[in-house]
Amino acid sequence: MQTILITGGTGLIGESLVPFLTGKGYAVIILTRNKEDKKDIPGVRYAEWDIKKQTIDQSAIEQSDYIIHLAGAGVVDKKWTKEYKQTIIDSRTHSSALLVKALGEYKNEVKAIVSASAIGYYGSDERKSSPF
């Protein structure tokens, strides 16, 4: 059975993606800041990471065949002040840096990484180019 490591697995996209993947027979590891308060889901285990401290559960990296990176501060959660814009950027760059660091430090067989950082899309018509 192949294993997919997901950051942001309890977020908007992750909540739909995880049952889809387990339904297809994948084992899923969700990286979280606190695995103690997570509900049990068949085929899913939780592993801890701390982006601020740049620490990650080594076994999660070592056991993963693929990584789906969805973690980041919500883009519709708060008003986009200068400070919150920086929080959005930092949440994505620092979490990505931690994954890159871990992949370089720990033995792994990761075949591919998919990273996404927002919902919505921009159309080709300038009058309709809104993600909402």
Image: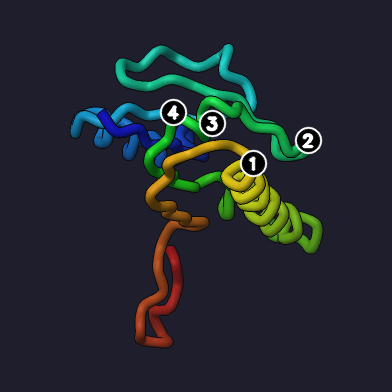
Q: Is residue 35 left or right of residue 93?
A: left
Dot 1: what SS?
A: helix
Which dot marks residue 29?
Answer: 4
In the image, residue 110 sits, relative to residue 37, either above or below, namely below
For the residue pair 122 and 9, the one nearer the viewer reads as: 9
Asked which colour scheme the image uses, the reply is: rainbow
Front: mark 1 or 4? 1
Separation (CA) of disc 1 from disc 2? 16 Å
Q: Which mark is drawn over residue 105?
A: 1
Gap in angstroms between the C-alphas marked 3 and 1: 17 Å
Q: Earlier in the sequence, mark 3 or mark 2?
A: 3
* Sequence-wise first label, 1 or 4: 4
Give the residue displayed 42% in from the left and 87% down from the top: 126
Is 120 displayed left or right of 77 in the figure? Answer: left
User: Can you give x and y, in whole percent of width and height, for residue 131 in the image?
Assistant: 44, 66
> Can you tell which of label 1 and label 2 is closer to the viewer?
1
- Inspect the image, locate mark 3, and give the three-letter code of the amino acid beneath it: Leu
Q: What is the three-letter code of the residue carrying label 4?
A: Ile
Q: Mark 3 points at which residue?
A: 31
Secondary structure under badge 2?
loop
Report whether 127 appears left or right of 48. Answer: left
- Mark toward the start of the polypeptide (3 vs 1): 3
Residue type highlighted by circle 2: Lys
Q: Dot 3: few (<14), some (14–19), or many (≥20) neighbours within 10 Å?
A: many
